[in-house]
Amino acid sequence: MLARVANNLYWMGRYIERSEHVARYMHVNYFSSLDAPNELSQDRQFVLRSMKFMVGDPANDPDEILDEIEVLHDLGLNSEKGFSIINNVKSTRENANSARDLISTELYEAINKFYHFVLNYDQDLYVKRGLYDFCVNITEMTTILRGKIRATLLHDEVYAIIMMGMNLERATQIIRIINAKYNDALLARNGYDQDVGKSFEWITLLKCAESYDMMRRFYKKSPSSLSTLEFLILNGSCPRSVMNSLDQVSKHIHVLEKSKNPSKDSAAFFIEKVRAELKFKHIEEIEGNIRDFIETKLNDLVLIADKLEKEFFNY
Amino acid sequence: MITQTNPIFSCYEYNDGLYDEVFNAQGETKELYETLFKLYCGHSIEDYMQLNNKAKSSFFNQGITFQVYGEKETKEKIFPFDLFPRIIGAKEWDHIESGALQRSRALNLFLWDIYHDKKILKDGIVPMDLIGSSANYLQAMIGVDPPGGIYNHVSGTDIIKHSDGEYYVLEDNIRCPSGVSYVVCNRTALKRALFGVFNHYRAHTVTNYAENLLEILQSVKPKGIDFPTCVVITPGMYNSAYYEHSYLAKAMGVELVEGRDLYVENDFVYMKTISGPQKVDVIYRRVDDLFMDPLEFRADSTLGVPGIFAAYRKGNVCLANAPGTGVADDKAVYTYMPQIIKYYLDEEPILNNVHTYHCSRPEELKYVLEHISELVVKPVDESGGYGISIGNKLTKEQIAEVREKIKKEPRKYIAQPIMSLSVHPTYIDESQSFEQRHVDLRTFTLLGDKKDFVLKGGLSRVALQKGNLVVNSSQGGGSKDTWVLKDN
């Protein structure tokens, strides 16, 4: 398999995953805020700021009044913004194009439909009435893509590379979402509920990760900061958790890394190291120091990506 | 003018001067098409529109699109596809197939000759200066022995049916002929839309092209290689034929590479894979030869691989088609095809050539300049339908312009009588009815070491504008599924 094409497939995986998380974050936050229990969480400006924070484009001036239409447009359909959904989808297709001979016709056709859906979405409708429809369609279409990837591709190197891209991106996005919602919870503390541990924002966080229902099933009680973080970071059976994502990355790197004892500089070695660290952490260690944890983990993920690039995509 | 009475063909106008493939001069359906015609008449025009739209969106969603150069924003377009297939009977096909194969063989021998002993030139069959003055004659290929002795592994022959009912070859394409992926797509699309009609005919499959191409490529492997690694090289995904390149790579199960994925070391070619370099033995090339190697040809090319020609000259890698084949599909060489076939194969040409006037010959130039309005004037070295002027469609001023152009560079032009391409009922979106449109046929012939193959089928291209004779997709042409019937 060509190194250049492998790189493109890896990024295809990342972009698919990224589009989904941005779309879900947008609509979950927007709609859950409409009837939020405290004034701040209900505030439009608060929600828009949270959205911008999540995609890495924070509004730094606390007095600035954000324009709702502009923010929604930027995140969804503004092709001049690198983080917008439309750009993620364009990049998905561009990367798929260059590997068209390696992926199945079915997968390509689904990507192409996805692309045309976003490209042809009425911009006016989207900012006025279409937010829910647009975002839900994005998340559903990415689910279809995931299904086509799993069910129509050969589970070989091509598959492993796409899956690594997806899971690394998932881990990254989940940590970013935790970061954004943690930030929101701290801000909302001054409002109706004083206790960060029981903030309404944890429920939103779980919904942003599509994990609310299963979390309830697992703990059988209302989410608190501790249980939410534990579920989303450390619970390997939660398919959205950082742990689960790293388990997946680890599984797929071994398709590419043939050696049983990879060298200490290799991507495989480093992935196992990060995974082992997480495996033997308990949530109290993290909760006291969530900022540090977020920073280290994001750095680790960047380092994994660097190592993958050096080892496999360096053409 | 006879008007058909069936609803789906209710607006079909029959013109006396044109050769209709489906209806005879009395407006009756020809035997070959009778069953098909009846089946199609079972549909209403509304059914048809619906099917047509479905087929269109199927092409669009599959991303089977092409891009046209020269437009400000290169936009994706669907290659227009017509749901009324063209049928060729078994006997008629044998004639076309043996003729196409004959031409490819003769061209291959011709190429070998002009890059080695030049016997045909010395014997005065083909004039020396015709080759000497050709921009496509690659000096670098002189004396080079391509693996298996094959130059034109893939040939596309453009054939038309004239108003006399005879087939004529319009041109041979032996550089990088494209279109075969559309043959396969057209079949798939027609099967999806109108599967029922296939039960009534025994048509040959067209999906076996890729497997035969792979066998051909494997047959011309460099010496000493048992299991050659074959790849397809593409200029990249912004090339107008990228879909075809990716289709062929996928259907053959080989890598689709770009120039930057390959490098040359000690005159061997390697591709850069996730597990390090891998040697490449046979390259099906969809990059023009002048762009293949910046060290040897165009230094500004970023599409090629530095040093690949040296590897080729040493016999360490096979390029298909060989560099320098363009000299033989030159439209001026075309006019000598009957003599070339006779010279190398000692056979009469099976397919007719269109009579051609060479503007490089003074007496013929004189005739051409005086009769521009009755002739098609073509530049000898362009492809894709660019630069063609059709005499009876020109205004006086345009004729004067063409005359000046020819006078300036007579060697650059040839002229042919205006051939009337046969017509085929074609569904026209704007009028929502079937109308007569001109069609041609591109056949695909493969030559390998002790193996050859002609695809039973081909690309029937349709000029979608009324009266238009240029069928190239870059000029707004569409295509039809083409059935070659099995012998009964």
Image (cartoon, rainbow, N blue to C red):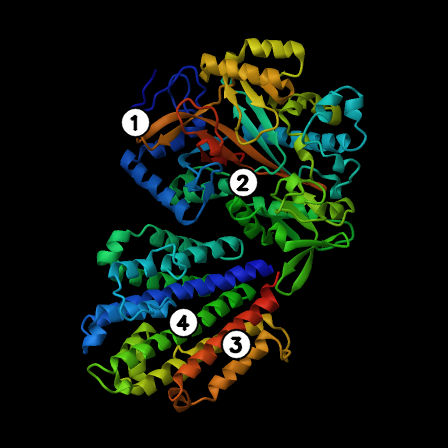
Locate the N terminus of chain B and report the quarter of the image it occupies: top left
The three-letter amino acid code for the residue at tag 4 is Gln
Which comes sooner in the sequence, label 3 or label 4? 4
- Answer yes or no: are tags 3 and 4 on the same subunit: yes
The three-letter amino acid code for the residue at tag 1 is Asn
| Residue that carries the numbered disc 4 in the rendered image | A173
At x 60%, y 20%, the residue is B413
Q: Is residue B258 left or right of residue B473?
A: right
Q: Which chain hosts label 1?
A: B
Task: Name the front one of labels 1 and 3.
Answer: 3
Identify the mark at residue B6; answer none if there is no mark: 1
Q: Position of residue A13 (x, y in %)?
A: 46, 64
- Mark 3–mark 4 Cα distance, whole angstroms, equals 18 Å
Q: Position of residue B374 (x, y in %)?
A: 51, 12
Q: Which chain hosts label 2?
A: B
| Residue that carries the numbered disc 3 in the rendered image | A250
Contact check, label 1 and label 3, Cβ < 8 Å: no
Q: Position of residue B322 (x, y in %)?
A: 69, 40
Instruction: Pick the residue in front: B482 or A23.
Output: A23
- Mark 2–mark 1 Cα distance, whole angstroms, equals 34 Å
Task: Name the front one of labels 2 and 1.
Answer: 2
Q: Is residue B228 visible?
A: no
Task: Name the front one of labels 3 and 2.
Answer: 3
Identify the mark at residue B180; answer none if there is no mark: 2
Task: Name the front one of labels 3 and 4.
Answer: 4
The three-letter amino acid code for the residue at tag 2 is Val
Q: Is residue A60 visible?
A: yes
Q: Position of residue A99 (x, y in %)?
A: 52, 55
Against A71, residue B131 (above or below) is above
At x 66%, y 11%, the residue is B362
Instruction: Pick the residue in front: B189 or B33.
Output: B189
